[in-house]
Structures are given as structure tokens and as C-alpha cells.
Amino acid sequence: MKNTLSTTDIIALGFMLFAFFLGAGNIIFPPMAGQLAGENLLPAMGGFLLTAAGLPLITVVAVATAGGTWEHLTSELPKKVAFVIAALIFIIIGPAFAAPRAGLVAYEMGVRPFLSQPNAMYLALFSLCFFVLAMALAWTQGSLLDTIGKILTPIMFLGLVLLSIAVVINPQGPIIHAQGDYMSQPFTKGILEGYLTMDTFASLMFGMLLVQAIHSKGVTERADVARYLIVAGVIAAVGLCLVYIALFYLGATSNSIAAGLENGGAILAEYVKALFGEQGQWVLSGIVLLACLTTAVGLISASSDFFSRHSKLDYKFWVVVNGSVCAFVANIGLAQLIELSIPVLFALYPIAIALVALTFVRQWLPKPQLAYRMVLSIAFLCALLDAAKVIGWDVSVFQFIPLFELGLGWVLPTVIAIVTMMFVGERNIALYQG
């Protein structure tokens, strides 16, 4: 008998993916970007939505199209290379950056405002409690759909809807002039800000986590799994877009009450206080804690699943290892963690995007193995130059590369490589010989 998901399960699947995506970066970056974009709100928001919502959706579709696993997605690459890429991505979205950042933002926005004299000890204790809870929720993979999709996410989503309505009905100030790079290149700046959410990386791996959740419901047919993955991706992307639009507008209308603050979390906190008074901090804390917790659960679960499949140690062992490392790294501090992550993202994001693009054009590649290796190599080498520029190294000799000044020097060489590889191979040779 062929099993199918109920409508409730499908919605819960989409909500689970939305919850996994909506974490620390998704909350703290849009308000600051909106404030700085000012009158250029729409192009900045468009760029941000492209990389922070559009790319993750496209990536989920690519994972579904390829077969639902990393092995299917990277079948044209040498196994060792595919493993190294996956391991780097899992380390970034797991214990190194994204998951600890979720804990840090949960502390900074959800707990610290209630402490009279916050210090490192409070952060250490909170990190321990937060990630112990995250480990407990990630302990049993098969329960993620019911725990995250049907319980935690609807509560969080309701809070976000109420906040969004309040922002639209009662904006706290006028939209003023754009600042910094948002004055001259708001769309490009928005694209680069969307990188920082890390959701394209996450969607490569969350797709596999969703496959397991679907399998736990007895659905194993590849076509059915792909269809449910795509529907879940659409639900998550729509939810992300609605949240981003509200947070961008919040930031754009925040100058009267929150000008000059150091990050989007602080802007959001001041705005909520202006809308709802001191009790509004409780509402914000609840939303942030749930958003960051669900994201941490997804990241720890996805990372642990990967490392358990590529080692002799079981899933629960890796849950403990990843959760423990996250708790430790979270004590570095939010600003320092974000600063460390930026060059890494600039170096690896283009590989993920190129891999997704190759998935969609694979059927037109005469020599897929050659194409994958050439395109990903070119994307990586050009991305290293962008990363070096971010670090502060002198790479001005490469200014001739289109879009290099904007931090997107990898785009045109990668596109040219993909198009070229569509005409290089045995079919082309046979055509000329014939």
C-alpha cells in the first residue's frame, strides 16, 4: 500500500523547514539592513530575499530533483571531494558558526535584557542549558516533525504574525535617506547580507533531514518524497519572505527610536518596547528563544546525522559532541563569531550555488563529471579572491574581473564555465566527426 502524507503533515513539514531556517541571522540582519537602506528599502530587500529566501528554496528543489540525498547531489564528484565539501558545510552550519550563533542571539535578545548585571558566567550557564535542551529535542530523529513542525513552530509563527501586524499598523517613524553602501548599490548589498543567514548551506542539509522525516511517516517513493520536499520548501520560503519584509520595514521605520544601535537585535528590541511597552520584551524573548531553539535543533540533528553516517559512532553520540561544542563556541561572543564567519561564507557560498546550478543543467552536460569538477574549481578559486578581499588582503590586481568590487567576482567566471561545459564533450566531438 502506497503511503501518503496528510495535509496536516505536509503543512507541519513546511513549518518544520521554516523553523529550521528562521534562526539567529534571519532575525538580526533584516532590521539593520532595513534601517541602513532607508529610502532604498525595496531594492535592498529584493537582493536580500533573493539570497536569503530564493536561494534556499531553489536549493531544496535541487535536492529533491537530485534524489533527496547529498550523495545524489554530488554523484558526479569524487567521493572524497564530496565528503570534504559536505563536512565543511556541516561544520559551518553546525558547531562552528550557525548553531552557536543561534544560542548567542537567544541569550542576547531573550535573556540578557532581564539581567541587571550580565556577565560571562550568565552566558556560560545559559549556553549549557540552551544546548542541553536542543540536544534533548534532537535526540530522536523521527520525532522532529511532530515536535518542531506541529508544536513549536505554530507558536513562534503566531508571535511573528502579531509583531508584523503591529509594525505595519503602527510604524514608529518615517523612512529616511540610505546610508553607506545602500546609497549606491542597495540591491547588491542586500544580496551579500542575505549570505550571512547561511540558509543556502542549511537547505542543502535540511533537505536530507526532511527526507528522513518523510520516511518516518512511511513515504518512500522517490517521486512522492521529491514532491513533498518541494511543497515544504515553498511553504518555508513564503514564511521567510513575510518575516523578512516585516523586519525590513521595521528597520526602515526605526530611526526615530533606534538610530545608531550596533545590531539588528538591538533595533528589534527597542522597536518592540516602543510598540508594546516593557512587557513587549517578554513577547520578543519568547519569539527569539523559540526561533533560535528550533534552528539549533535542526542544525545539530543534521550535522549529527551526517557524521554518524560517515563514522562508526552513532547518531546520539554525535548529538552530544555537536551540542557540547556549540555550547563552548557560543561563549566567544556574537560580534566576534559573525566577524569570523564572513570570509568563510564568501569562500564557500559560491560552491554551494554552483552545485545547485549544475543540478538543474546536468541533463545538458555532455561530460557531467568533467563539468562538475571544472565549474566548482573555478567558483572556488574566484570565491577565495572575494574572501581575501573581505579579510583585507590586497587583491587589487584582480579588479578587472566583473563584479569583483562588489564581492561577486565569482559570478561571471562560474556562469561562463557552466555554459562552456554544455558544449564540451563527446556529443560535441561526435557532431563534428559526423
Image (cartoon, rainbow, N blue to C red):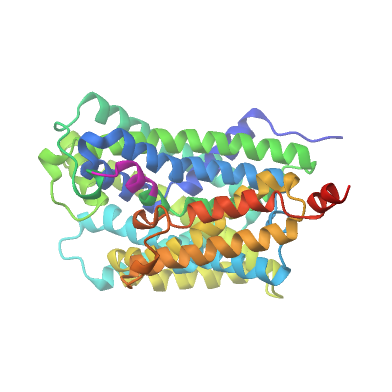
Question: Above or below — where is 136 with respect to 270?
Answer: below
Which quadrant of the structure image shows residue 321? bottom right
- Seen at 71% across and 63% down, the residue is 77
Q: Position of residue 44 (x, y in %)?
A: 32, 40
Residue at point 21% right, 55% down? 114
Relative to 111, does residue 335 appear above or below in the rendering? below
Give percent across and percent down for residue 298. 53, 54
Left or right: 245 with respect to 67? left
Residue visible at 24% across and 41% down in the picture: 37
Q: Is residue 209 above or below residue 183?
A: below
Q: Viewer-proximal residue, 111 or 292?
A: 292
Q: In this view, which residue lies farthest toward the left? A: 256
Which residue shows up at 16% across the image and 33% down it?
172
Q: Position of residue 374 (x, y in %)?
A: 64, 62
Q: Main secondary structure of the magenta part?
A: helix
Work out which residue is located at the far front of the displayed protein and give it. Answer: 433
Q: Is residue 347 above or below residue 21?
A: below
Nearer-the-camera pick, 330 or 84: 84
**Side (left or right) of 105 relative to 94:** left
- Can residue 114 be seen in this snapshot? yes
Residue 136 visible here: no
- Asked if the magenta segment contains residue 187, the reply would be yes
Compared across the picture, whether 227 is left or right of 28 comes to right
| Quarter of the image where one finds residue 282 | top left
Answer whether residue 343 is magenta in the image. Answer: no
Magenta span: 184-191
Measuring from the top left, give residue 354's x and y in whole percent.
58, 54
